[in-house]
Image (tube, grey):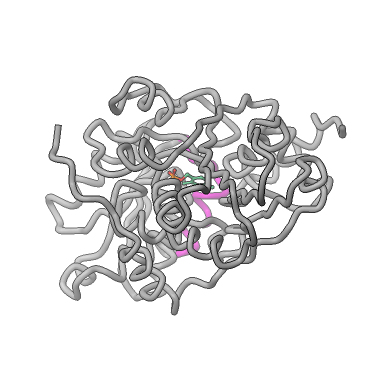
Amino acid sequence: MKEIKSQVTIQNVWGARKRISSLIGRTPAVESFILSEKLGRPVYLKLETVHDTGAFKVRGAANKILSLSEEERKLGVATYSTGNHGMAVAYVAKKLGIQATVCISNRVPKAKVDSLKRLGAAIEFCGESQDEAGERCLMLENDHGLTVIEPFDDPEVIAGQGTIGLELLEDIPHLKDVVVPLSGGGLLSGIGMAVKTNDPSIRVTGVSMVESAVMHESLRAGRPVKMPEKDTLADSLLGGIGLDNRYTFGMVQKYMDRGVLIPEEEIAHSMAFMMDHHRMIMEGAAATGIAALLGNHIEYKDGAVAVIITGHNVDLSVVQHVLNGYHPE
Ligand SMILES: *Cc1c(COP(=O)(O)O)cnc(C)c1O
């Protein structure tokens, strides 16, 4: 076990907000009248899909890369990712004129690979899992001095994702519940810390798919565990949390009130539901949050709910498949 490092603080999140503001725009939180009606309380969709890369991960990537020294920037950055984080790193690096190398597993959907190439990143395919891609990335760091931009277990990345929490507090009256899709936990750690530091009565729910829910299994075991990756509509939630996890395991333990696991059919239904009622495309990972609401997993009734619509990067063939199986309620 590595030492437990000191936690990310609210000051880090304010610092991140200032640092990334010239690169990353604020996102809207819009009320969903159909979901508000269903739940009997205001439901807001925090639209992280409006970023250029179509997912929230640009916040953490921008905060981390902008924290690097001139020397580190010259040597370039590297990352391994299920796609959205890699895209975020490539995007931010391109904007800042830094070379990015992305190591990804063969499971990553084609649409994401194409987008990475368009952003000018050097792509390295490695194996069937995030772990193999991670090992390759460490080699680049050791042998060539590239800085690996971690997808979630990094204080700057967590603080960057936490800026969402500040925006929720500012934009949503009577916020009481925040529903956060959960994988490595950078997003939940940042948002959870930011909202609860300001108002400890706000509840945070972490949502994952039933299969390969590594953070949930780790919390149950009381320590980070490893699990095989299974195919899921929520492919952006795949990946381990690292057996030597330093930050997010402890922070999710501290800031998450409740964990919810969503079966594949409900993820598919929620994706189609949002297309049907909002004409909004979101990827499976983001739809897990909607599924938690539609399945009545958020049992409280007071105040407003915010659900983080984390990304919309999904192959159209998947969208088509999901719509074909849709049965409107
Ligand atoms: C990365 C990601 C998540 C989960 O974020 P973590 O910080 O790994 O918990 C959720 N949704 C989408 C679309 C993502 O890309």
Q: Residue at x 60, y 44 (%)?
A: 286
Q: Residue 293 location in percent, x, y?
A: 68, 38
User: Where does the magenta region start and end?
Assistant: 107-119
Location of residue 14 by image quarter: bottom left
Q: Residue 9 location in percent, x, y?
A: 30, 58
Residue 49 vs residue 92, the one in the foreground: 49
Tell me: residue 123, above or below residue 164. Answer: above
Location of residue 61 by image quarter: bottom left
Among all residues in the image, which is located at the extreme bottom?
Answer: 22
Tell me: residue 159, above or below residue 292. Answer: below
Among all residues in the image, which is located at the extreme right?
Answer: 328
Quarter of the rendering occupied by the N terminus: top left
Residue 39 appears left or right of 118? right
Residue 88 appears left or right of 307? left
Q: Residue 27 location in percent, x, y?
A: 59, 66
Residue 282 vs residue 143, the one in the foreground: 282
Tell me: residue 176, above or below residue 22. Answer: above
Q: Residue 231 location in percent, x, y?
A: 53, 27
Residue 113 vs residue 215, the one in the foreground: 215
Q: Residue at x 62, y 44 (%)?
A: 283
Residue 303: in magenta span: no
Q: Please, what is the dominant secondary structure of the magenta stretch? A: helix
Q: Residue at x 22, y 35 (%)?
A: 244
How many numbered discs sit on the rendered protein?
Answer: 0
Q: Residue at x 50, y 41 (%)?
A: 236
Tell me: residue 143, above or below residue 227. Answer: below
Quarter of the rendering occupied by the C terminus: top right
Residue 145 appears left or right of 57? left
